[in-house]
Structure formats: C-alpha cells, structure tokens
Amino acid sequence: MARRLVQRPNIRELLKEYRKARPWIMIKELFMIALSTIPYALTVNQLLVPHAIVGGGVTGLCEIIYFATKTYVPIWLSSALINILLLVIAAVTVGKSYALRTVWGVMWLTIWLKVIPIAQIPLLTDSFMAVVVGGLFTGCFLGICFLNNGSTGGTDIVAMIVNKYHHLPMGRVLLVADMTIISSAFFLPTIQAAGTQGAIEKILFGLTYTFMSSTAVDWVMNRMRQSVQFMIFTQKPDEIAEAIITQAHRGCTFLEAEGGYYKQPMKVVTTIARSYESATIFRLVRSIDPN
C-alpha cells in the first residue's frame, strides 16, 4: 500500500504570507519595546533614586548628575540629552538602521522617566531587596526588548562604537563603563552623607543591581532562543511530518534507518524547534502515533 505523500508548502505562498504579516510583526516589536521600558523607569524612580543607589549605564550617569545638582537637573532630561548625542554619533559611525530602532526605545524610556514620579518613600524599604528585585525586574523586560530588536541606548551605543574601531568585546566595554559610573558615585555628597561604610555599601548595592540585571537579561534571551532537536521513530512518518509542517509550522527531515533487531527499514522524522514549542510537537506526535 503506497504511503500518502506530504503536501509540500508553496514557497511563493509562504513569501506572500510573510510580506502580509511583516507590518504586524514590526508593530508588535515596537509595542513590546515601548512596554519593556516601563519597568526600567519604574525601578530607577521608585527603587534606586529613593535609596540613593546609582546603577550602571547612562541612567546611572544621569542619577549622578541628578544628585550632584541637588535634584535641579531631572533624570529624564539628562538621559534624553546624552542619548541624543550618542545616537547622532552612532548614526554616523555604526549606521542609521541601528539608530532608528534605538530612537524608539530611548523616546519611550524618556517618557516613562518623566511620567513616573520619583518616590519620596521607596516601594521596598530594604536596600538589598530593592536592588535584587529591581535588577531582576529590569533585566527580564530588557531581555524582551532585545529579543524584539530594540535597545534603550546608553552605554550599549558606546560599546558598539568602541567594538567597531578597536574590536574589543562589547561585554567587557559595558562592564568597564558600568563599574566606572557606579564607582564614581562614591564621591557624591548624598552618598558621603551615609559615612564611608555606608558609601561603600551603596556602591556594592549598585554593582549588585547591575549584576542581577545583566544575569536576568542573559537568562531571558537564552531561554527564548534555546532550541531542541526531535528524532521521532514511528510507523506513521508521513502523517507526523505533515502535522509538524502544517500545524507546528516547522520544517522536518526524513532519515533512512534500519531496526537493530528485526532489520526492517523505517523512516525517522527529525525536526528542530524552540524549547517552548516542545509541548505542541509532543501533543501532535502522540495524537497521531501514541507508540
């Protein structure tokens, strides 16, 4: 009995569907970039500034300006001015395509930093819990921002420019920049008012916040990008392949195999998918061939 052949997808039709979906994909990405900047601004204005803790990046530099001028220069204003300057440099050196996406993220970060008020009483009274929760909160949503091809500007732009001309790892440039900004906060009168021991604690809290944030970013991005490989040994390879292609929207490949005991030829279906798609593929396979 001849096996039913899998209907191959039409490449032209797939390209046509992709072109139709592309505007909606861009709208979704821009929406997620704007949404992901809210926790960043919330953490700065409601957790870090009330505790006089300086984080890394351009926002940390803006906190230093804010404390040094005795709150005369608001964080949102200095953040906008510094990022505009960096974006102009990036547009000339790196390219306009990178700068355009970053402008969107910087614009919304500036808006939220202005809209969300600086708390007189922090949301979390314990400084250590504030930096841990704030770092995880910020890092998770920044990871979502990066997965949607977005950026909040800041030292990311500096790292990219340095990497282009000196070929230094971006992670190393970001680490040096963040540690320099956080350590320089030690000399602020607001930090010095807590005494030498208290000032050192503030610096350590800032470094802890940066560590938690970067760790959360890596976790989110690696989790969403992690892939798994399926090797499906079945007596219904054509039906399973068709289900994977049409319902899970993943390609698959047939491998010619031979049973080790009965020496009977068989086909093995293999496919690669994101880790979060595993449940869908398992469900399809079991619904067609429970064995």
Image (cartoon, rainbow, N blue to C red):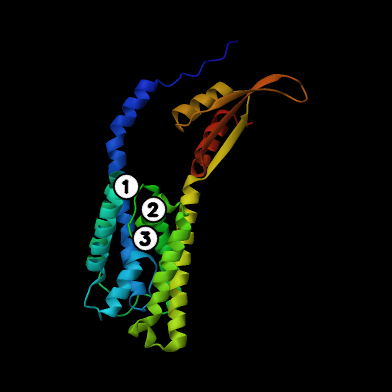
**Which residue in the protein does label 2 denote?**
160
81 or 13, nearer to the observer: 81
* Number of on-image labels: 3
Q: For the N terminus, which image quadrant?
A: top right
Which residue appears farthest toward the right when viewing the image? 261
Residue at 25% across, 79% down: 69
Q: Earlier in the sequence, mark 2 or mark 3?
A: 3
**Which residue in the protein does label 1 denote?**
98
**Which residue in the protein does label 3 denote?**
155
Q: Earlier in the sequence, mark 2 or mark 1?
A: 1
Q: Secondary structure at mark 3?
A: helix
Is residue 247 shown left or right of residue 80? right
Residue at 39% across, 51% down: 146
Q: CA distance from mark 2 to mark 3?
A: 9 Å
Position in image of residue 98 (x %, y %): 32, 47
Q: For the C terminus, which image quadrant?
A: top right
Position in image of residue 244 (x %, y %): 50, 30
Q: Residues within 10 Å of mark 2 (few under 14, many from 20)?
A: many
Q: Earlier in the sequence, mark 1 or mark 3?
A: 1
| Kind of residue sitting beneath label 3 | Thr
Is residue 13 shown left or right of residue 256? left
| Kind of residue sitting beneath label 1 | Tyr
Position in image of residue 115 (x %, y %): 22, 66
